Image: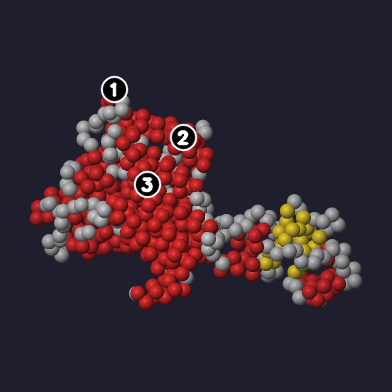
Amino acid sequence: MRSWLQGAAAGSAPLMAAAVVVGAGAGLAAVAFRWLVQTATLLFTGTPDYAATSGHPANPWVPWLGGAFVILAPAVGGLIYGPLVHRFAREARGHGVPEVMYAVARKGGPIPGRVAVVKALASAITIGSGGSVGREGPIVQIGSALGSTLGRITRMPENQLRTLVACGAAGGIAATFNAPIAGVFFALELILRNFATRSFAAVMLSSITASVIARSILGDHPFLTLPSFSIARPSEYLLFMALGLAAGAVGVLFSRILYAIEDLCDRAWRWPEWARPAVGGLLVGLVLFALPQLYGVGYPVLEASIAGKYAIGFLLLLVIAKIVATSLTIGIGGSGGVFAPSLVVGAAFGAAAGQAIGLAVPDLAGQSGAFALVGMAAVFAGATRAPITAGLILFELTGEYSIILPLLLAVIVATGTSRLLSRDTIYTRKLTRRGVDLHDPARRGFATTRVGDVMADPPPTLAPDQAAGEAFATLADARRRSAPVIGPDGELIGILTAADAAQALATDEGSASATVEHITVRATALAPDQHLSTVLDDVVDAAATDDLPVVSEGRLVGWLHTTDVLRAVTR
């Protein structure tokens, strides 16, 4: 492996150097973002992590409110980040990863630099004020924006700009989770969606750099500290397969509830968008008041689930409540990720399954922690359909090699279940709803490429009163299969094809009195501002003429060749 890494680096030294810079920036950004989240949480609750407390304590800044302060905290936070996002970077709203996927797949990689700043502030305030979302989606978007900004400053070509965006995403994940390998595969599997050698080398360099930076500041230790787990007998693998099957369905359910609640919020809100997080924050606050364990990211709850501190009933309540709280936070316009919530949901669901199995099979009692770990990866795989990332992230998070085989087995089953139940993932569903289909490589780029971007200049035109024989000679001399017919007022009448002209000359229509107007066929006219994705059927129908006219305000302004559309496909 070292030889091809050296070859790739030697072939693109500027890209490798930029990858190291992006990795360092993403590592520092991840550390700074974690500090921002902790500071915001301390300001809003008076504690480093309110989900880790017990007894619903009051906020020391407003003790007279008691535990009810959590009703107001998300609304106050929304009053701050709502106008910030609306005014400076609306891309910072939501969970971030779909926006990065869209920028890479459809726009060539450009992400405005201001997104990094606005996303960091908005997400920190969202999480600190109680929003039940994760910090991994934001750091992916922040790191990607850093990579994109550096690539545009250094005038990197489009393919290298995409790679630098992925480098930023990998660096963010690596630094946040202390998981450099998982960071690499997250970027390749979800952002770039390919494993090209040169991209792999650059993304790996960035991930390693970010991880080194974060470890030097935060220390080198597993993200989660857990007791050892083991598999006592081979028959348990069947139980882990069953867990993967159920967890894959839970991941799909998470995705569907997320967007169903987002749609509900969109339909219900009729006032200025900047005020939506503040008003909606009261609903989030009521959920937190009922179940304060949902406050913020929820890693303490995840660890407690794995440690067996909750009963089955409460674990199942956590599964549904965390999904609803996360969906509501994003639906009202909050800024945060769904990565960590899927892990929390998976841990609670897996722990509940493990405890239920322990009751049914006493010999397996006490193994709920192992099922919780596997459930984390399986629900994440079911939601994102990224099995490599799911397997590696849990291995690096815990450092538990003993659980790797049942983990991978459950992840594979969960991914297959998700594919059977849903065409989209929790990330791609957001893009599909915008009309962007990442599953169809033939339409890559068509959603943003307009007819005017690829059309050619209009060819020589024919007049409707020209003789048919003269028109046929003109087409033959120009070696064209068709030409536009333009009326005396400059309007497009239709298209005359060489085949139609030849057929007319071979019949009575080809007499001396026959004119172009008599044998012109009406053509489908396109507009220069139409996207290619909306005109593909027209292009196929026009295969006989090879061309389509492009008209603006009734005037011929361009000529779309089918070969130009094919070039757009390959490009």
Does 438 appear above or below 91? Answer: below
Taking the spot 60% from the left edge, 68% from the top edge, the residue there is: 567
Query: Label 1: which residue?
Result: 64
Foreground pick, 420 / 164: 164
Taking the spot 52% from the left edge, 39% from the top edge, the residue there is: 87
Disc 3 packing (10 Å; few <14; some 14–19; many ≥20): many
Indicate the position of residue 395 as horizontal and vertical percent values. Answer: 25, 60
- Whether residue 281 appears in this view of the structure is no
Indicate the position of residue 185 as horizontal and vertical percent values. Answer: 36, 62
Does 30 appear above or below 475? Answer: above
- Residue type at tag 1: Trp
Identify the secondary structure beneath mark 3: helix
Evaluate if marks 2 and 3 touch, with contact meaning CB atoms under 8 Å apart: no
Disc 2 packing (10 Å; few <14; some 14–19; many ≥20): many
Query: Label 2: which residue?
Result: 276
- Which of pointers 2 and 1 lies earlier in the amino acid sequence? 1
Taking the spot 44% from the left edge, 66% from the top edge, the residue there is: 16
- Which of pointers 3 and 1 lies earlier in the amino acid sequence? 3
In the displayed structure image, the side of residue 350 where residue 515 appears, left or right: right
Q: Toward which corner of the image does residue 522 lie, by quadrant?
A: bottom right
Front disc: 3 or 1: 3
Q: Toward which corner of the image does residue 6 lie, by quadrant?
A: bottom left
Foreground pick, 105 / 464: 105
- Whether residue 358 appears in this view of the structure is yes
Query: Label 3: which residue?
Result: 33
Indicate the position of residue 519 as horizontal and vertical percent values. Answer: 80, 66
Residue farthest along the left direction in this orientation: 363
